[in-house]
Amino acid sequence: MMDAAGLDTLIAARIRRERESRGWSIAELAAASGVSRAMISKVERAEASPTAALLGRLSGAFHLTVSALLARAEADAGPSRIARAVAQPGWTDPATGYRRRAVSPPGAEPELVEVELPPGARVAYTASSLAFLRGQVAWVLAGRLVVEEGAEEATLGAGDCIAFDLVAPKGHAYRNPSATRPCRYLVALHRR
């Protein structure tokens, strides 16, 4: 697995490549994502490690999932249709300690992402970062997970699974209610 600094460099280059391939300026990406121009500039220069929320907003502006953006960044180092466990791209949110690993090969449908949410951590996604998805399902592997979707909240335990209403996405958040144990879950994402 690649170290954090190497992955940050690949993410920086991939975000710049995605922006430039659309003919967007940094200001246009800022308007589309709601992320400041200064922060986008720092991320593109690999001077700042993006958080899960920030990556969600940037990838949403590109109509990509976070895992697709990370997989494209990792694929820039060498593509493969087989995702070997030791080479699956992993990423840790510097703000929350949230860890995600892209399980499926780049471009596979559905995209499978394994997540470990530290005790007490919460990660939120805006509706715009989900608008290009056709479907999303989360399956809890270990621990407990609270899923906030709009004003609704569901608490899930190991083995429980939730499907999201993405017809009119409201944005949602994942929260680990435990003060001592991490929560592991698998997310399956289908693009439109």
Image (cartoon, rainbow, N blue to C red):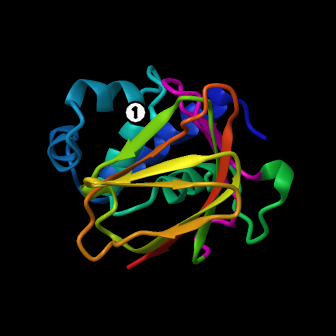
| Number of numbered discs on residues | 1
Residue 55 within the segment the image draws in magenta: no
Q: Residues within 10 Å of mark 1 (few under 14, many from 20)?
A: many
Instruction: Locate residue 175, reporting x and y percent.
Output: 49, 41
Please identify the quarter of the rendering in which residue 110 is found. Answer: bottom right
> Would you say the magenta stretch is mainly helix, strand or loop?
loop
Asked if residue 169 shows in the view, the reply is: yes
At 32% from the left and 46% from the top, the residue drawn is: 57
Image vertical order of residue 183 relative to residue 39, above or below:
below
Residue 97 within the segment the image draws in magenta: yes
Instruction: Locate residue 164, reporting x and y percent.
Output: 41, 69
Q: In the displayed structure, does residue 94 sit left or right of residue 104?
A: left
What residue did someone put label 1 on?
Answer: 44
Image vertical order of residue 97 relative to residue 146, above or below:
above
Instruction: Locate residue 119, reporting x and y percent.
Output: 61, 30
Q: In the displayed structure, does residue 63 sit left or right of residue 111?
A: left
Instruction: Tell me the quadrant of the picture where the N terminus can be found.
Output: top right
Q: Secondary structure at mark 1?
A: helix
Instruction: Locate residue 149, reporting x and y percent.
Output: 33, 56
Query: Which is nearer the eye, 158 or 11?
Result: 158
Residue positioned most to the top:
47
Q: Which residues are magenta?
A: 88-108
Instruction: Tell me the quadrant of the picture where the C terminus can be found.
Output: bottom left
Asked if residue 16 shows in the view, the reply is: no
At 26% from the left and 55% from the top, the residue drawn is: 150
Identity, as a three-letter code, of the amino acid under mark 1: Glu
